Structure formats: C-alpha cells, structure tokens
Image: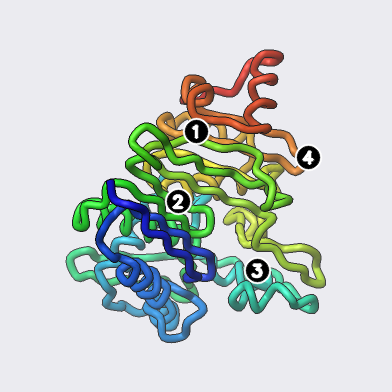
Amino acid sequence: MAPFRELSFRAMNTDIQVSLGTDVPLQEDVTDWFARTEKRFSRFLPDSELSRINQLSGKTTLISAAMAEVLALAEMYRHKTGGIFHFMLLDALQHAGYSRSFEQLAPMRDILAQPPVPHDCQISLNASMRSVKLGPGTHLDLGGIVKGWSVDRLGDWLKREKHVTRGFLNAGGDLLVWGGFDEDEPWLVGIADPRDNDVEIAQVALVDGAVATSSVLGRRWQTKQGDMHHLIDPRTLRPSKSEIVQCTIVGSHVTECEVWAKVACIVGLSAFLPLFGRHLPHCDALLVTQTGELHFAGDRNRLEANWHGTAVAFIHDTIEQEGWIHHG
C-alpha cells in the first residue's frame, strides 16, 4: 500500500490540507488546480473571469467551460433551495462591509455598512453558446459554492485519472475522503466548536464521503451598525439572523453539503428540517444554536455507527429522554 503524500498550503483565502495514498508526486497538480480555480472565480482579483463577468453586467459574455459548469450548478441549487442559496447578492455583501479579502477586512473597525439596494437579480445562461448575460445591476459572488465544487472536481480527477485509491482533501472545512485511512480503518473527521476551533465537539468516521461546515462566527466583522457576517439572507439582503450558528452536513458530494449547510444557517432549525427531510435523506446534519444547543438530523443507524464525541453523547442522551430528530 502506497504511503501518504502530505501537503498543506493556502489558496482561495483558506487553508488547504491534502493527504493522498499514492507513489506518484501530485503536489504540483494539486496546488496548480487551486491556484487556477482562485484566479478564475475570485471576486477579489480584478482580472479574474468572475470579475470580468461582473464588470460586463447587462451584456452577453462568453465564458469558460468551468465557469459554465459552476454557474449551472449554482442556478440549480438556487431553484432547489427556493432561492435561499443565492449567488447574485454581491452588492448586498459589499453593502454589509465585505468589500475586500477577509484578511484585510478583519482588523478594520471603522466600516460603515450601507443599507442594501433591492433589485431584480437576473441571469441568462446559454449552454450551447457557452455564454452568460446578467441583468443590469446584477453581480455574482460564487464563494458559497466554488470551494466545494473545486474539492469535488479535484477528487474525481485524482480517483479517475491518477488512480489514487485513498485520499483526503480539505479546503477550509469543506472536505472529501475516500478509500479509508487504512484497509480496515476509516478517516476520522473532526468537527470544531464554533466558538473555539481548537476544541472538537464531534468526530465522524468515514471510509468514503463528504463533509462541509458553515458558520456565522468565522467570517465576521464589526461595523458602526454592529457585527456582520458573510451569509446573506436573500429575503432581507442582510446577514442572516437565525438561531443556527453552525451546521455540518455529511453526505456524498462536498458541493451539496456546502450549499445546504449555508441554507441551514440562514433559515434556522424549524424551517431547515422539512427541507432536509425532502432533499437530503442520504445525509446527516449536526447543528449548533446560539445558546449551544445541539441538534442531529439524519439516520439513527449512521449516528450510532459513525458519530463520536461529546456532542454525540449529548445527542444520545437527548434521544433517550425526548425522542430524536430523524428526517431521512
């Protein structure tokens, strides 16, 4: 069995961790993939393809195959989530003060958040022409989906083209694992406490699968109008205010987990659970509220077999005392 090749670096404004069971040196392929993805999709790079599309709002623009794929995926999830996942709210995000890369934003304390300006967000995708036309005044932010997509696509390529039989890809908490850590040992994925990233509240054991965590406590900044964060509620055009501060979803595809974890944080527990039951019967979700309450949605057999840690012990106690949340 091939030893693991380890790699850690920073790209797409997040920490990337990679562990691949292969004899083939793939470090350059991996770093190049994330560098090219950032160069194409970053809203903070003035010469990125995404910036060019935003600059040409209102005009038909030819786009790359990768951009067409991500936009089609984002539009599909926008419809599937009833518009809660929304990738055309860049103006609202900037009005809230997130106008520059987060590491430059975090030290600032004099940001003046502006009231959002409502307008009809429109997009027209032409698959045969491979083009896009945004409605006048519409601007895109693909940060809510492209990280998960990049992990999914890289994982597919490593397995299919490079025959990597065991792997771990982690892009800032959006991760994909396959093949197990060893022949008889799964990968153990830790889930951090939203208020202290050095503390784990749970672990999930996976041979193959995807995990994505979204939190309103990570990318957060202060303005003269109060604290803001990066998850915009499309119904108010302001940072969301639900009781869910963190959601982790475990499933098969990172993109799917990433999108729905954000939806959970935006809509809150009572609205999310019916959506979870309808769309994610194959997934599990661990949700943390502002008051520290823990909620699990998913399959009880998977909970007992795969989940461990203090949060899971609490959930088991709650199951015994009050019944449990099962939407699958």
Label 4, secondary structure: give it.
loop
Residue beneath label 2, please? 175
Q: Is 65 rendered above or below residue 20?
A: below
* Mark-to-mark CA distance, 3 and 2: 33 Å
Residue at image coords 53%, 58%? 172
Residue 79 in view here: no
Decide: few, some or many residues near mark 2? Use Cα within 10 Å; few <14, some 14-19, many ≥20.
many
Circle nearer the N terminus (3, 2): 3
Circle 3: residue type: Pro
Circle 4: residue type: Thr
Label 3, secondary structure: give it.
loop
Residue at image coords 61%, 57%? 231
- Observer-side mark, 4 or 2, equals 2
Decide: few, some or many residues near mark 1? Use Cα within 10 Å; few <14, some 14-19, many ≥20.
many
* Mark-to-mark CA distance, 1 and 3: 35 Å
Circle nearer the N terminus (4, 2): 2
> In the image, 8: left or right of 269?
left
Circle 1: residue type: Asp
* Mark-to-mark CA distance, 4 and 1: 21 Å
Decide: few, some or many residues near mark 3? Use Cα within 10 Å; few <14, some 14-19, many ≥20.
some
Circles 4, 2 touching at the beta carbon (< 8 Å): no
Label 2, secondary structure: give it.
strand
Circles 4, 1 touching at the beta carbon (< 8 Å): no
Residue beneath label 4, please? 291
Q: Which color scheme does this rendered protein use?
A: rainbow
